[in-house]
Amino acid sequence: MQFIDRYPIIVTDKFAECRDFWTRHLSFAVLFENDWFVLMQADGASMAFMSPSHPSYPPGPEAYFAGSSMELEVKDAAAALAEMQATGKEPDYPLTDEPFGQRRFSIKDPSGLWINVVQQL
């Protein structure tokens, strides 16, 4: 299999709010957008949000609910936190050196998706 891209699609009725959140606080850029879907990318990492009003719904993907998280691995978690805080967003889980070898902080986007920004120590 030869992939062109790979990305999760989060189904949420707050997909426009998610687009704005990921653009403002996590430096993602919109690659494609229409009334029910937005594809975003930053530094080669892609993700998408889709409204439950997607033409294939139902049947189709269920709306997002807790149980998943998105890992954003960075070289310097403290620098990433400072960059995000400069946009006005504070972490939901503070910058922490974890006993399992990671420095991380976490935030939630408007869909409720838990986002871990992680540096391997």
Image (cartoon, rainbow, N blue to C red):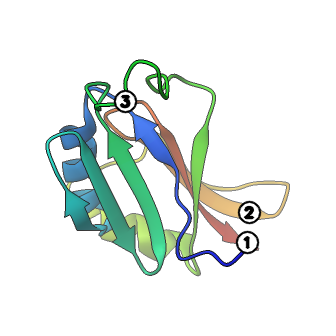
Give me the disc on residue 108.
none
Q: Position of residue 69 (x, y in %)?
A: 59, 42
* Residue 50 vertical placement versus 48 (above, below): above
**Mark identifier at residue 56:** 3
Q: Residue at x 43, y 57 (%)?
A: 47
Disc with the residue nearer the chain's start (2 vs 1): 2
Labels 1, 3: front one: 3
Expressed as whole percent of the image width and height from the top left, the position of residue 71 reads: 60, 56
The amino acid type found where label 2 is placed reads Gln
Q: Which residue is mark 2?
A: 102
Q: Secondary structure at mark 3?
A: loop
Residue at x 73% of width, y 72% of height: 120
Q: Which residue is mark 1?
A: 120
Q: Position of residue 103 (x, y in %)?
A: 66, 63
Separation (CA) of disc 1 from disc 3? 39 Å
- From the viewer's side, name the closer residue of 17 and 12: 12
Quarter location, residue 55 = top left
Q: Which quadrant, please, contains the N terminus?
A: bottom right
Numbered disc 2: secondary structure: strand
Q: How many other residues sit within 10 Å of disc 2, few (<14), some (14-19) or many (≥20)?
A: some
- Neighbour tally class for label 1: few under 14, some 14-19, many 20 plus, Cα within 10 Å: some
Residue flagged by tag 1: what amino acid is it?
Answer: Gln
Distance CA(mark 2)–CA(mark 3): 40 Å
Looking at the image, can residue 107 be seen? no
Instruction: Using the image, determine if residue 71 lies above or below residue 74.
Output: above
